[in-house]
Amino acid sequence: MSAQVQGSVFCRIFAMFVCLLTLAQLGSAADDPKAKQIDAILSAVTSKNEPGLAVVVRKNGHTVFERGYGMRDLRSGLPIDKHTNFRLASVTKQFTAMAVMLLVHDGKLHYEDRLTDIFPGFPAYGQQITIRNLLNHTSGLQDYVDLLYKKYPDKDSDQIPQINDEGVLSMMKEQTGTKFPPGTKWEYSNSGYCVLAMVVQTVSGKPFGDFLHDRIFAPLKMRNTLEFEYGKNRVPDRAYGYTKVGGRWLETDQSPTSATLGDGSIYSSVDDLIKWDDALWNHTLLTEEEMRPAITPVILPEGRLLPKGHDGIPHEYGFGWFLEPYRGHKRMDHEGGTVGFHHNISRFLDEKLTIIVLCNRLDLSAWGQVHAIADLYLVDGK
Protein backbone atom coordinates (compact mmCIF):
# COMPACT_ATOMS: atom_id res chain seq x y z
CA MET A 1 0.00 0.00 0.00
CA SER A 2 1.41 3.39 -1.00
CA ALA A 3 2.09 6.08 1.58
CA GLN A 4 -0.57 8.24 -0.10
CA VAL A 5 -3.21 5.51 0.23
CA GLN A 6 -2.15 4.77 3.80
CA GLY A 7 -2.52 8.46 4.63
CA SER A 8 -5.99 8.57 3.06
CA VAL A 9 -7.13 5.51 5.00
CA PHE A 10 -5.76 6.96 8.23
CA CYS A 11 -7.58 10.25 7.64
CA ARG A 12 -10.89 8.44 7.07
CA ILE A 13 -10.45 6.33 10.21
CA PHE A 14 -9.52 9.40 12.25
CA ALA A 15 -12.55 11.29 10.91
CA MET A 16 -14.83 8.37 11.84
CA PHE A 17 -13.32 8.31 15.33
CA VAL A 18 -13.93 12.03 15.82
CA CYS A 19 -17.50 11.65 14.54
CA LEU A 20 -18.23 8.76 16.90
CA LEU A 21 -16.68 10.63 19.81
CA THR A 22 -18.81 13.70 19.04
CA LEU A 23 -21.97 11.59 18.82
CA ALA A 24 -21.13 9.96 22.13
CA GLN A 25 -20.70 13.33 23.77
CA LEU A 26 -23.96 14.64 22.31
CA GLY A 27 -25.73 11.48 23.38
CA SER A 28 -24.52 11.79 26.97
CA ALA A 29 -26.02 15.29 27.16
CA ALA A 30 -29.25 14.32 25.41
CA ASP A 31 -29.62 11.22 27.58
CA ASP A 32 -29.53 13.23 30.80
CA PRO A 33 -32.88 12.36 32.42
CA LYS A 34 -33.50 16.01 33.26
CA ALA A 35 -32.94 17.30 29.72
CA LYS A 36 -36.60 16.97 28.71
CA GLN A 37 -37.69 18.70 31.91
CA ILE A 38 -35.30 21.60 31.29
CA ASP A 39 -36.50 21.90 27.71
CA ALA A 40 -40.12 21.94 28.88
CA ILE A 41 -39.38 24.74 31.37
CA LEU A 42 -37.70 26.94 28.76
CA SER A 43 -39.99 26.10 25.83
CA ALA A 44 -42.93 27.26 27.94
CA VAL A 45 -41.55 30.82 28.22
CA THR A 46 -40.02 31.30 24.76
CA SER A 47 -41.06 31.30 21.11
CA LYS A 48 -38.96 30.73 18.00
CA ASN A 49 -40.29 34.01 16.53
CA GLU A 50 -39.38 36.25 19.48
CA PRO A 51 -36.23 37.20 21.40
CA GLY A 52 -35.26 34.42 23.75
CA LEU A 53 -32.40 32.95 25.70
CA ALA A 54 -29.41 30.63 25.75
CA VAL A 55 -28.80 28.16 28.54
CA VAL A 56 -26.10 25.78 29.66
CA VAL A 57 -26.23 23.32 32.55
CA ARG A 58 -23.07 21.63 33.80
CA LYS A 59 -22.62 18.89 36.38
CA ASN A 60 -19.31 17.64 37.73
CA GLY A 61 -17.39 19.47 35.03
CA HIS A 62 -19.48 18.10 32.14
CA THR A 63 -22.05 19.88 30.02
CA VAL A 64 -25.39 18.08 30.33
CA PHE A 65 -27.59 20.63 28.56
CA GLU A 66 -26.81 23.48 26.14
CA ARG A 67 -29.38 25.11 23.89
CA GLY A 68 -30.71 28.34 22.42
CA TYR A 69 -34.34 29.47 22.21
CA GLY A 70 -35.81 32.27 20.10
CA MET A 71 -34.09 34.88 17.96
CA ARG A 72 -30.91 36.80 18.57
CA ASP A 73 -31.95 39.60 16.20
CA LEU A 74 -35.49 40.24 14.95
CA ARG A 75 -34.23 42.11 11.88
CA SER A 76 -32.26 39.16 10.52
CA GLY A 77 -34.39 36.43 12.06
CA LEU A 78 -31.25 34.53 13.06
CA PRO A 79 -31.79 32.03 15.89
CA ILE A 80 -30.03 31.99 19.24
CA ASP A 81 -27.54 29.17 19.59
CA LYS A 82 -24.66 28.27 21.89
CA HIS A 83 -22.34 30.70 20.06
CA THR A 84 -24.66 33.73 20.33
CA ASN A 85 -22.97 36.61 22.17
CA PHE A 86 -25.01 38.56 24.72
CA ARG A 87 -24.03 41.76 26.50
CA LEU A 88 -23.37 40.33 29.97
CA ALA A 89 -24.17 43.52 31.90
CA SER A 90 -23.17 43.04 35.56
CA VAL A 91 -22.02 39.46 35.01
CA THR A 92 -19.00 41.38 33.69
CA LYS A 93 -18.02 42.24 37.27
CA GLN A 94 -16.58 38.77 37.98
CA PHE A 95 -14.14 39.29 35.09
CA THR A 96 -13.22 42.78 36.29
CA ALA A 97 -12.57 41.30 39.73
CA MET A 98 -10.43 38.54 38.19
CA ALA A 99 -8.37 41.15 36.33
CA VAL A 100 -7.67 42.94 39.63
CA MET A 101 -6.81 39.65 41.34
CA LEU A 102 -4.38 38.77 38.56
CA LEU A 103 -2.55 42.07 39.17
CA VAL A 104 -2.40 41.17 42.87
CA HIS A 105 -1.02 37.77 41.81
CA ASP A 106 1.61 39.63 39.75
CA GLY A 107 2.61 41.70 42.79
CA LYS A 108 1.67 44.94 41.00
CA LEU A 109 -1.35 45.69 43.19
CA HIS A 110 -2.53 45.02 46.76
CA TYR A 111 -6.04 44.83 48.15
CA GLU A 112 -5.24 47.48 50.76
CA ASP A 113 -3.85 49.98 48.24
CA ARG A 114 -5.76 53.28 48.33
CA LEU A 115 -7.32 55.15 45.44
CA THR A 116 -4.85 57.96 46.02
CA ASP A 117 -1.99 55.45 45.63
CA ILE A 118 -3.17 54.63 42.11
CA PHE A 119 -4.43 58.07 41.15
CA PRO A 120 -2.30 60.71 42.96
CA GLY A 121 -4.59 63.50 41.77
CA PHE A 122 -7.69 61.91 43.29
CA PRO A 123 -9.39 64.03 46.01
CA ALA A 124 -8.41 63.47 49.63
CA TYR A 125 -11.48 61.35 50.36
CA GLY A 126 -9.88 58.64 48.18
CA GLN A 127 -7.30 58.04 50.93
CA GLN A 128 -9.96 56.06 52.79
CA ILE A 129 -11.04 53.87 49.83
CA THR A 130 -9.13 50.64 49.26
CA ILE A 131 -9.15 48.28 46.29
CA ARG A 132 -10.90 45.81 48.58
CA ASN A 133 -13.67 48.37 49.23
CA LEU A 134 -14.19 48.75 45.48
CA LEU A 135 -14.30 44.99 44.92
CA ASN A 136 -16.83 44.21 47.67
CA HIS A 137 -19.06 47.30 47.26
CA THR A 138 -18.17 49.03 50.53
CA SER A 139 -16.49 52.10 48.98
CA GLY A 140 -19.43 54.47 49.33
CA LEU A 141 -18.65 56.09 45.97
CA GLN A 142 -21.39 58.24 44.51
CA ASP A 143 -23.60 56.52 41.93
CA TYR A 144 -22.47 57.67 38.49
CA VAL A 145 -25.87 56.89 36.98
CA ASP A 146 -27.58 59.26 39.41
CA LEU A 147 -24.93 61.90 38.76
CA LEU A 148 -25.29 61.48 35.01
CA TYR A 149 -29.04 62.04 35.06
CA LYS A 150 -28.61 65.04 37.38
CA LYS A 151 -26.19 66.49 34.86
CA TYR A 152 -28.83 66.28 32.12
CA PRO A 153 -32.11 66.85 33.99
CA ASP A 154 -34.04 68.02 30.94
CA LYS A 155 -33.01 65.25 28.56
CA ASP A 156 -34.66 61.92 27.88
CA SER A 157 -32.53 58.82 28.35
CA ASP A 158 -31.86 58.41 24.62
CA GLN A 159 -30.61 62.01 24.43
CA ILE A 160 -27.97 61.68 27.16
CA PRO A 161 -24.46 61.04 25.76
CA GLN A 162 -22.83 57.78 26.73
CA ILE A 163 -20.20 57.84 29.45
CA ASN A 164 -17.10 55.62 29.64
CA ASP A 165 -14.95 54.44 32.57
CA GLU A 166 -12.59 57.39 32.25
CA GLY A 167 -15.60 59.68 32.40
CA VAL A 168 -16.82 57.94 35.56
CA LEU A 169 -13.40 58.36 37.18
CA SER A 170 -13.45 62.06 36.30
CA MET A 171 -16.93 62.33 37.74
CA MET A 172 -15.73 60.74 41.01
CA LYS A 173 -12.85 63.23 41.13
CA GLU A 174 -15.39 66.05 41.04
CA GLN A 175 -17.05 64.80 44.23
CA THR A 176 -16.05 65.93 47.71
CA GLY A 177 -16.86 62.75 49.60
CA THR A 178 -18.58 59.39 49.71
CA LYS A 179 -22.16 58.42 50.55
CA PHE A 180 -20.91 56.78 53.78
CA PRO A 181 -17.52 56.15 55.41
CA PRO A 182 -15.77 53.45 53.35
CA GLY A 183 -16.01 49.99 54.90
CA THR A 184 -18.93 50.83 57.20
CA LYS A 185 -21.84 49.89 54.90
CA TRP A 186 -22.58 47.76 51.85
CA GLU A 187 -24.15 49.30 48.77
CA TYR A 188 -23.92 47.89 45.27
CA SER A 189 -21.72 50.22 43.24
CA ASN A 190 -21.36 50.32 39.47
CA SER A 191 -19.12 53.35 40.00
CA GLY A 192 -16.66 51.20 41.93
CA TYR A 193 -16.28 48.69 39.10
CA CYS A 194 -15.82 51.42 36.48
CA VAL A 195 -13.05 52.82 38.66
CA LEU A 196 -11.56 49.31 38.97
CA ALA A 197 -11.35 49.11 35.18
CA MET A 198 -9.29 52.30 35.27
CA VAL A 199 -7.15 50.84 38.06
CA VAL A 200 -6.38 47.81 35.87
CA GLN A 201 -5.59 50.04 32.91
CA THR A 202 -3.33 52.33 34.95
CA VAL A 203 -1.43 49.60 36.80
CA SER A 204 -1.02 47.24 33.83
CA GLY A 205 -0.29 49.93 31.24
CA LYS A 206 -2.78 48.28 28.87
CA PRO A 207 -6.30 49.27 27.82
CA PHE A 208 -8.73 47.39 30.03
CA GLY A 209 -10.20 45.35 27.17
CA ASP A 210 -6.72 44.32 26.00
CA PHE A 211 -5.78 43.19 29.51
CA LEU A 212 -8.91 41.03 29.73
CA HIS A 213 -8.15 39.52 26.33
CA ASP A 214 -4.48 38.83 27.05
CA ARG A 215 -4.83 37.51 30.59
CA ILE A 216 -8.28 35.86 30.62
CA PHE A 217 -10.02 35.37 27.27
CA ALA A 218 -7.05 34.25 25.13
CA PRO A 219 -5.52 31.84 27.71
CA LEU A 220 -8.93 30.22 28.22
CA LYS A 221 -9.61 30.13 24.45
CA MET A 222 -12.75 32.23 24.90
CA ARG A 223 -12.29 33.28 21.27
CA ASN A 224 -15.53 35.22 20.78
CA THR A 225 -15.63 36.96 24.18
CA LEU A 226 -14.68 40.63 24.25
CA GLU A 227 -15.14 44.03 25.82
CA PHE A 228 -17.21 45.81 23.19
CA GLU A 229 -16.15 49.36 22.36
CA TYR A 230 -18.12 51.14 19.64
CA GLY A 231 -15.93 51.96 16.66
CA LYS A 232 -13.04 49.83 17.93
CA ASN A 233 -14.29 46.27 17.56
CA ARG A 234 -17.39 44.30 16.61
CA VAL A 235 -19.32 41.51 18.30
CA PRO A 236 -19.57 38.25 16.33
CA ASP A 237 -22.92 36.41 16.42
CA ARG A 238 -24.37 39.33 18.37
CA ALA A 239 -27.69 39.21 20.20
CA TYR A 240 -29.58 42.50 20.42
CA GLY A 241 -31.67 43.41 23.44
CA TYR A 242 -35.46 43.86 23.29
CA THR A 243 -38.29 45.18 25.41
CA LYS A 244 -41.98 44.48 24.74
CA VAL A 245 -44.03 47.68 24.70
CA GLY A 246 -47.72 47.72 23.77
CA GLY A 247 -47.51 44.22 22.38
CA ARG A 248 -44.56 45.09 20.10
CA TRP A 249 -40.89 44.25 20.46
CA LEU A 250 -38.66 47.32 20.55
CA GLU A 251 -34.90 47.07 20.18
CA THR A 252 -33.58 48.54 23.44
CA ASP A 253 -29.94 47.64 23.10
CA GLN A 254 -28.10 50.78 24.17
CA SER A 255 -28.38 53.34 26.96
CA PRO A 256 -26.22 56.21 28.31
CA THR A 257 -24.35 53.64 30.47
CA SER A 258 -23.65 51.10 27.71
CA ALA A 259 -20.11 52.37 27.03
CA THR A 260 -18.68 51.73 30.50
CA LEU A 261 -16.55 48.58 30.56
CA GLY A 262 -15.72 47.61 34.12
CA ASP A 263 -19.32 47.29 35.29
CA GLY A 264 -21.02 45.66 32.34
CA SER A 265 -19.82 45.62 28.71
CA ILE A 266 -18.43 42.15 28.12
CA TYR A 267 -20.13 40.14 25.37
CA SER A 268 -19.97 36.37 25.62
CA SER A 269 -21.82 33.15 24.79
CA VAL A 270 -22.81 30.14 26.86
CA ASP A 271 -20.23 28.13 24.90
CA ASP A 272 -17.40 30.48 25.92
CA LEU A 273 -18.72 30.68 29.49
CA ILE A 274 -18.26 26.91 29.74
CA LYS A 275 -14.51 27.58 29.42
CA TRP A 276 -14.75 30.24 32.14
CA ASP A 277 -16.60 27.79 34.37
CA ASP A 278 -13.94 25.13 33.79
CA ALA A 279 -11.21 27.63 34.69
CA LEU A 280 -12.96 28.44 37.96
CA TRP A 281 -13.42 24.79 38.93
CA ASN A 282 -9.86 23.88 37.94
CA HIS A 283 -8.14 27.04 39.30
CA THR A 284 -6.55 27.68 35.92
CA LEU A 285 -5.91 31.40 36.40
CA LEU A 286 -5.48 31.61 40.17
CA THR A 287 -4.76 29.02 42.84
CA GLU A 288 -7.50 27.99 45.23
CA GLU A 289 -5.90 30.13 47.93
CA GLU A 290 -5.62 33.16 45.65
CA MET A 291 -9.28 32.76 44.64
CA ARG A 292 -10.52 32.52 48.24
CA PRO A 293 -11.04 36.31 48.76
CA ALA A 294 -13.48 36.33 45.84
CA ILE A 295 -15.74 33.82 47.57
CA THR A 296 -15.37 35.18 51.12
CA PRO A 297 -18.38 37.31 52.16
CA VAL A 298 -17.75 40.89 53.17
CA ILE A 299 -17.92 41.51 56.93
CA LEU A 300 -19.11 44.89 58.19
CA PRO A 301 -18.10 46.44 61.52
CA GLU A 302 -19.90 45.08 64.58
CA GLY A 303 -23.50 46.22 64.74
CA ARG A 304 -23.68 46.94 61.02
CA LEU A 305 -26.09 44.70 59.10
CA LEU A 306 -25.97 43.83 55.43
CA PRO A 307 -29.08 44.96 53.52
CA LYS A 308 -31.52 42.27 52.39
CA GLY A 309 -32.19 41.31 48.80
CA HIS A 310 -35.55 40.82 47.14
CA ASP A 311 -35.75 37.28 48.55
CA GLY A 312 -35.26 38.51 52.13
CA ILE A 313 -31.75 37.05 52.49
CA PRO A 314 -29.02 39.51 53.56
CA HIS A 315 -26.66 40.34 50.71
CA GLU A 316 -23.36 38.50 50.95
CA TYR A 317 -20.72 39.57 48.45
CA GLY A 318 -17.11 38.69 47.72
CA PHE A 319 -15.21 40.02 44.73
CA GLY A 320 -17.54 40.11 41.72
CA TRP A 321 -19.80 37.39 43.14
CA PHE A 322 -22.88 37.25 45.34
CA LEU A 323 -22.49 34.45 47.89
CA GLU A 324 -26.04 33.99 49.12
CA PRO A 325 -27.25 30.36 49.44
CA TYR A 326 -30.26 28.98 47.58
CA ARG A 327 -32.51 26.63 49.58
CA GLY A 328 -29.61 25.95 51.91
CA HIS A 329 -27.17 25.13 49.10
CA LYS A 330 -23.88 27.00 49.00
CA ARG A 331 -23.70 29.15 45.88
CA MET A 332 -21.75 31.87 44.10
CA ASP A 333 -23.79 33.75 41.50
CA HIS A 334 -24.34 37.04 39.75
CA GLU A 335 -27.16 38.63 37.81
CA GLY A 336 -26.78 41.00 34.91
CA GLY A 337 -29.51 43.38 33.85
CA THR A 338 -29.57 46.28 31.41
CA VAL A 339 -31.74 47.59 28.58
CA GLY A 340 -32.94 44.51 26.70
CA PHE A 341 -30.89 41.92 28.60
CA HIS A 342 -31.21 39.85 31.77
CA HIS A 343 -28.81 37.07 32.85
CA ASN A 344 -27.79 34.87 35.73
CA ILE A 345 -24.84 32.57 36.32
CA SER A 346 -25.13 30.34 39.38
CA ARG A 347 -22.49 27.91 40.62
CA PHE A 348 -23.55 25.50 43.37
CA LEU A 349 -20.25 24.65 44.99
CA ASP A 350 -20.93 21.45 46.92
CA GLU A 351 -22.93 19.88 44.09
CA LYS A 352 -20.48 21.12 41.41
CA LEU A 353 -23.49 22.32 39.44
CA THR A 354 -23.41 25.36 37.15
CA ILE A 355 -26.45 26.91 35.48
CA ILE A 356 -26.17 29.87 33.11
CA VAL A 357 -29.13 31.63 31.48
CA LEU A 358 -28.63 34.58 29.12
CA CYS A 359 -31.74 36.45 27.91
CA ASN A 360 -32.09 39.16 25.26
CA ARG A 361 -35.55 40.20 26.44
CA LEU A 362 -36.55 42.04 29.59
CA ASP A 363 -39.80 40.22 30.31
CA LEU A 364 -37.98 37.03 31.26
CA SER A 365 -36.32 36.53 34.64
CA ALA A 366 -33.04 34.69 34.14
CA TRP A 367 -32.97 34.30 37.92
CA GLY A 368 -36.36 32.54 37.82
CA GLN A 369 -35.30 30.15 35.05
CA VAL A 370 -32.07 29.29 36.87
CA HIS A 371 -34.03 28.50 40.03
CA ALA A 372 -36.53 26.35 38.15
CA ILE A 373 -33.68 24.33 36.64
CA ALA A 374 -31.77 24.17 39.92
CA ASP A 375 -34.83 22.70 41.64
CA LEU A 376 -34.56 19.68 39.33
CA TYR A 377 -31.10 18.94 40.70
CA LEU A 378 -31.22 20.22 44.26
CA VAL A 379 -34.64 19.18 45.53
CA ASP A 380 -33.43 15.67 46.34
CA GLY A 381 -29.98 16.81 47.42
CA LYS A 382 -28.24 14.98 44.59
Image: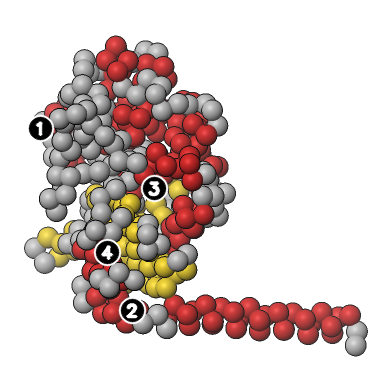
Nearer-N-terminus badge (3/1): 1
**Crowd around label 2: few <14 · some 14–19 · many ≥20 (10 Å):** some
Q: What kind of element bears circle 1? A: loop
Residue drawn at (35%, 79%) of the image = 35
The one nearer the camera, 348 or 71, is 348
Q: CA distance from mark 3 to mark 4?
A: 21 Å
Residue ID for mark 3: 266
Quarter of the image with the N terminus in it: bottom right
Nearer-N-terminus badge (3/4): 3
Mark 1: amino acid: Asp
Q: CA distance from mark 3 to mark 2?
A: 31 Å
Residue 342 lies, in percent from the top left, at 25, 56
Nearer-N-terminus badge (1/4): 1
Residue 81 appears in the rendering: no
Disc 3 versus disc 1: nearer the observer: 3
Residue ID for mark 2: 34
The reply to whether dot 3 and dot 1 touch (C-beta < 8 Å) is no
